[in-house]
Image: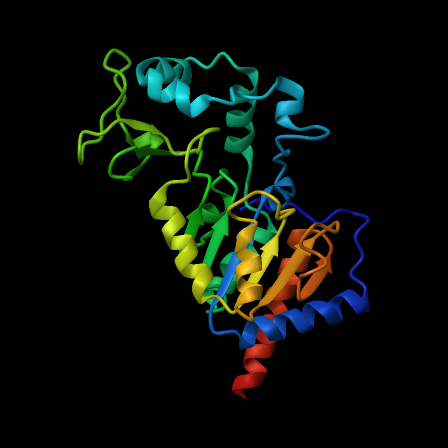
Amino acid sequence: MGQARAPDDFFLTDALDAEIARAGRAVAQADHVVGLTGAGLSVESGIPPFRGPGGLWTRYGEPPMDGYQRFLRDPAQAWRDRLNPKAPWAKALGETLAAAKPNSGHCALAGLERIGHCDALITQNIDDLHGQAGQQNLLEIHGNHFLLRCTECMTRFRQNEFQIDPDDLPPRCPECDGIVKGDTVHFGEPIPPDVLKRCYDEVGRADCMIVAGTSATVYPAAEFPLQVLRNGGVVIEVNPEASELTPVASISLRGPGGAVLERLMHHTQRASQEAGA
């Protein structure tokens, strides 16, 4: 499995590693740990952000802001556009996501889950990299680029396993005959209620949250770490730069997600072993 490396100019100082060790002890001692990730983590896998310098939308233009309303008005036409994409950003996004591989940050979070210290992971990313890294209890709040979703019963289907007849659009759900659309949440589209409910359930139980690669400004995800703090829990931020979450985070770790999360898994496992000795 290909993995992106930390930036060449990143140096793990003793002070930072001591802070990561403190975070690892907090994770090891927690009863219910939830992760929250954003686009910054996927940048290390070669996926550019949507906005800002080098962003897909910066280069190719933004998708329509009323994408979901357009789908509702004419789902058949929306599907014709999807099957014959005219927007350069859509083609660029598809090619970029198809080539991307999980990096060490994705693998570290999946590793924390395997050793019993990440009970759920909420991601704002649509790139499927957490799933490819082996994450099991994964809540993709903005959907998954490689899935389709029934708008009625919320059943998901892998795109490459779902038969679509271009002469009979929109496709229908084999479970309930509802209209099927891409799983990615469009502008103007509510977050799927099944995913959102599970997010609130997990966050309500969390006494520790690891927030990696997100500025924590897009709601409802931005509310999740604040809810953990209000409930008396610990919030660990992993980000190369300071964010709006930094002033309130219990522990703020400055560095690339892959390198820092790898060390966090190491220290969590060590703290857990020492506690059980």
**Relative to 103, does residue 185 appear above or below in the rendering?**
above
* Residue 200 in the image, given as x and y percentages of width and height: 42, 56
Rendered residue at 71%/60% (across/down): 253
Judged from this view, the residue extending furthest toward the bottom is 277
Q: Quadrant of residue 77?
A: top left
Q: Is residue 82 left or right of residue 233?
A: left
Q: Is residue 195 left or right of residue 9?
A: left
- The answer to which of 23 and 94 lies nearer the viewer is 23
Judged from this view, the residue extending furthest toward the front is 230
Q: How was the colour assigned to the protein in this rendering?
A: rainbow
* Residue 45 in the image, given as x and y percentages of width and height: 61, 41
Q: Is residue 39 left or right of residue 84?
A: right
**Relative to 213, does residue 225 appear above or below in the rendering?**
below
**Relative to 36, does residue 189 appear above or below in the rendering?**
above
* Residue 39 in the image, given as x and y percentages of width and height: 60, 41
* Residue 174 in the image, given as x and y percentages of width and height: 18, 32
Q: Quadrant of residue 228?
A: bottom right
Classify the position of the C terminus by image quarter.
Answer: bottom right
Rendered residue at 52%/43% (across/down): 124
- The answer to which of 137 and 252 lies nearer the viewer is 252
Task: Give the tally of numbered discs.
Answer: 0
